[in-house]
Amino acid sequence: MKDQIISLIAETLQEMNQSGEFTYETDTIQGDTPLYGGIEGTLDSLGLVKLIVAVEQGIQDRLNITVALADQKALSQTRTPFRNVNTLADHAINVIGMAAT
Amino acid sequence: MSAPITLITGTRKGIGQYLAEHYLQQGHQVIGCSRTAPEWQHENYTHFLLDVTNETAAQQMFSEVRRRFGGLDNLINNAGIAAMNHSLLTPIATVKQVLETNVIGTFLFCREGAKLMQARRKGRIINFSTVAVPLNLEGESAYVASKAAVEGLTRVLAREFAPLGITVNTIGPVPIETDLIRGVPAKKIEQLVARQALPRLGKPEDVAHVADFFISPESNFITGQIIYLGGVN
């Protein structure tokens, strides 16, 4: 499942790259690729919104599960779950697990 | 160029039905919804049965719209309910119902609609207020409060959605001969109409004219605006 989510995030970042919004090295998107926050985060807040919306839609399309990845709990965590591809994937899996139960 | 995809809430009857037929005539692919089924149909019209306050049902509908039509160009949040009574005689259940349909329903559809629109970096959202807001109309406290909230929502969302290429505007109609005002005493309607610069009842085509203006491609520099009919301000 985690590989699926990571490839979904990577595809979304590639699409955002193609539209010229961000400049990720698309061949090298990996688990530790930084996303949001900290010194290395490449996404601004609007970019994060777009990424989350696209990942939510991808989860809906591929797994037929409706999830909200940026609820109040996620936003209030001391360490943001959106800091890199790995943490976002882990967070998504956690939310999917809760939605499925 | 493919047909614009236009979603209108509350299309079973009244202004919603009029707007749906208006945009069908203009060649749009129209999607509508209401709690009960409409008695009309069209080959380019798709109807969903749902309550606009039901988050799960709304999300499923937008997901279906994305799958079937590939996106959304225009969203018209027409569905709304009114409660006309002195505030001392208005039960909280009624207040909650009005706020849920008019405010939460509008918020939910703006949120889900913008998710579809942002992928193509363009979209038009039209919400509905009423001249009862600027007129501070007595006897409509819950309704006016709900529509004042819709106006605030419109102004904030206009800013949040602007970087996504989406405009958000609001129409504030005067009383129109629909079921919404059918239960209001004629004298009260007369008094309200008398406060307008142009003292007559509104017509559905008056609303459609403003909607046409807001969804026009040339209106891409107009957002966060509230246009009242009848010369009310």
Image (cartoon, helix red, strand yellow):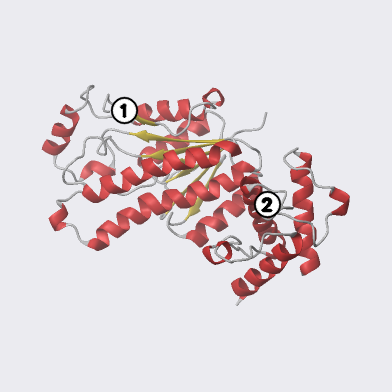
The answer to whether residue A54 is left or right of residue B50 is right
Which residue lies under the disc numbered 2?
A: A51
Q: In which quarter of the image is residue B60?
A: bottom right
**Residue at far bottom of view:** A101
Which residue lies under the disc numbered 1?
A: B229
* Disc 1 crowd, CA 10 A, few/some/many (<14, 14-19, 20+): many
Q: Is there any visible trace of residue B224 in the rendered image? A: yes
The answer to whether residue B206 is left or right of residue B114 is left
The quarter of the image holding the N terminus of chain B is top right
Q: Specify the amino acid type for callout 1.
A: Leu
User: Which residue is depicted at the point 26% across and 45% down?
Assistant: B144
- The one nearer the camera, B21 or B126, is B126
User: Which residue is depicted at the point 79% across and 54% down?
Assistant: A10
In the rendered image, residues at marks 2 and 1 fall on the same chain:
no
Q: Percent x, y for residue B195?
A: 17, 28
Q: SS for tag 2? A: helix
